[in-house]
Image (tube, rainbow, N blue to C red):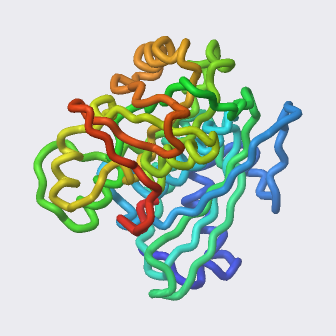
Amino acid sequence: MESVQLIHGEGGKYTETLIRDIFYEEFKNDILLKNGDSALLDIPSNKIAFTTDSFVVNPIFFRGGDIGKLAVCGTINDLTACGAEALYLSSSFIIEEGFLMQDLKKIARSMKDTCKQAKVNIVTGDTKVVPKGKVDKVFINTSGVGIVKNYFSNKIEKGDRVIVTGTVGEHGTAIAVDRYNLKVKGRIESDCAPLNSILDCLQGYYGSIKFMRDATRGGIGQILNEIANQSELGLHIFESKIPISNEVKSINEMLGINPLYLACEGRMVLVVDKYDSEDIVKVLVKEFNCDNASIIGEFTDEYEFVYIENDFGGKRILGSLDTQILPRIC
């Protein structure tokens, strides 16, 4: 069959064929191929991290990635932000009747390639098929388990600095361009990528890292507000230090969107001790290929909110996101 039919979700031979020919073929590893109701995992650690996420992005194929790559990266990055080395993933699909097999295969292959890059395995999962119109093409849920390598203190103090690992707003902008078929020039591409190798790069600075978070929905604007609220301190951001491409700036000016609130899917926000902040940026640039990593601000007790200062000394508040900007970006 060239497309997914309801019979593929009935648990019979067609379900078996779908799972064998697409998911087992692309995700195959010794644990998955045991075909048990649960994956039996060997995790040599006293502390593990566990996370789950669902992905409903529209469109499912976008410049720089697709819903499959996004699902794998999103879960790996959530584990990484907790200081955990990702080991195993689960993957569950809810598929609309009539969805093309070749597109499902393409998504599965993208997931396989991303897992290979990140050195993790998909070891269990589930597939459901629903009548046409009851879901938009395909939705994916992924869960992940990892070993905690470093537990960040979250004890943020005055003078601690904020680092972002690369240019911001690119994923949300790429989704907008493809969703609305905008005719724009320039290189617009999602930053979607697994970030798990950042832990090894920064191993020598674990004691200086207070907090990590991948800036997905709400972008760095929302993340910065959440960190400030948690710390009960103010946060002074320097506008000129925020790495953002000219293409992203131009497109969002046209759309009337503040790119600081647009999702990133391959960027990490770190809070670090000020004395090691510049060395950490150098390591990120040299070992993690973060050419645009930058210190964008520092914590202060002068105020109790997030504010941005421009090159002319003008200041404005950067508040929490309180409206819908771009739905279904992940």
Foreground residue, 231 or 296?
231
Image quarter of residue 106: bottom left
| 161 displayed left or right of 174 | right
Q: Which x, y percent locates residue 14?
A: 61, 76
Observer-nearest of 286 and 246:
246
Residue 236: x and y in percent read: 43, 34
Image side of residue 109 versus residue 78, left or right = left
At a point 64% along the width and 45% down the height, the residue shown is: 230
Furthest residue in direction right, as rendered:
46
Of all residues, the one furthest to the front in this rendering is: 302
Image check: 67 left or right of 119? left
Residue 116 in view (yes/no):
yes
Q: Residue at x 32, y 29 (%)?
A: 241
Q: Count the marks: how many?
A: 0
Q: Where does residue 210 sit, x and y in percent of width and height?
A: 64, 29
Q: Nearer the viewer, residue 39 or 179?
A: 179
Is residue 197 shown left or right of residue 49? left
